[in-house]
Image (cartoon, rainbow, N blue to C red):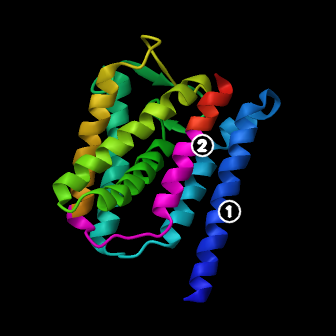
Amino acid sequence: MERQKRLQGISLLFLGILHLVGLVGLCIPASRALFQALTPLHLLLSLGVLLMFHRGWSPGFVAALAFIGLGGWLVEYVGVHSGHPFGSYHYGGTLGWKAGGIPLVMAINWVLIMYLAAAAGKKIAVSPIWQAAAGAAIATLLDFFIEPVAIFQDFWQWQSQQVPLQNYLAWWGISFLFLCIFYRFAPKSNNPLALPLLAMQFTFFLLLAWLQA
């Protein structure tokens, strides 16, 4: 037990340093391009460390993550090529390899955000439906803070130059669906690192948005 707690502490410290270094690197013009290119690695490392401490591994949990990853990427594909459900936007060249104009790492991003939102939803409500509703609201709020950073860093750009309201409505609806599936197939999911990492994500994007304003 003591060893596990020590490992959790080391992992949280690693994630904190990872976010701090990323924050500084993206703020400095001379290093910005390098750290933009490292964003996919940042997401992979964050998810990898998080899953090391997952409690409740099961075929249903793996299937839920796979569904969210593939489903999230497909929703992005439809969004870029049709303008629905988020609005008209396109991805820049800073998020790594693409297929059909969509960075492959977006699948990882959807899994990470939904996993963290699921952990938060469980803390807020008891019923799975209300957990999904609360978790979807948290995921949408996180996207609200991500948007100005993503636009500035050329992760993606909106055709209208502004983030449309439908983006946030779509984010809530899709997140709600994904979280309902997650709670259905992974009801015993638990992770001591999830809420601290969610707090890091909010802090990271809030600070980055403020520093680049």
Snapshot quadrant of residue 67: bottom left
Of all residues, the one furthest to the bottom in this rendering is 1
Q: Position of residue 176 (x, y in %)?
A: 24, 46
Residue 81 on image: x %, y %: 35, 23
Q: Say whether residue 66 is visible.
A: yes
The image quadrant of residue 181 is: bottom left
User: Which residue lies at the image location 59% right of the left edge and 25% below the top edge?
Assistant: 154
Classify 196 as above or below 113.
Answer: below
Return the residue at label 1: 14
- The first of marks 2 and 1 along the sequence is 1
- The secondary element bearing badge 2 is classed as helix
Q: 47 or 13, which is in the foreground?
A: 13
Please check the rendered image and state whether residue 188 is part of the magenta-colored stretch, yes or no: yes
Horizontal arrangement in the rendering, residue 42 relative to residue 17 (left or right): left
Whether residue 95 is visible here, answered yes or no, is no
Mark 1 Cα shell of 10 Å, populated few (<14), some (14-19), many (≥20)? some
Cα–Cα gap, marks 2 and 1: 14 Å
Residue annotated with mark 2: 204
- Give the residue displayed 62% in from the left and 50% down from the top: 42
Range of magenta residues: 184-205
Amino acid at pointer 1: Phe
Quadrant placement of the C terminus: top right
Quarter of the image containing the N terminus? Answer: bottom right
Indicate the amino acid at tag 2.
Phe
- Magenta stretch: includes residue 66: no
What is the x, y in percent for residue 124? 30, 57
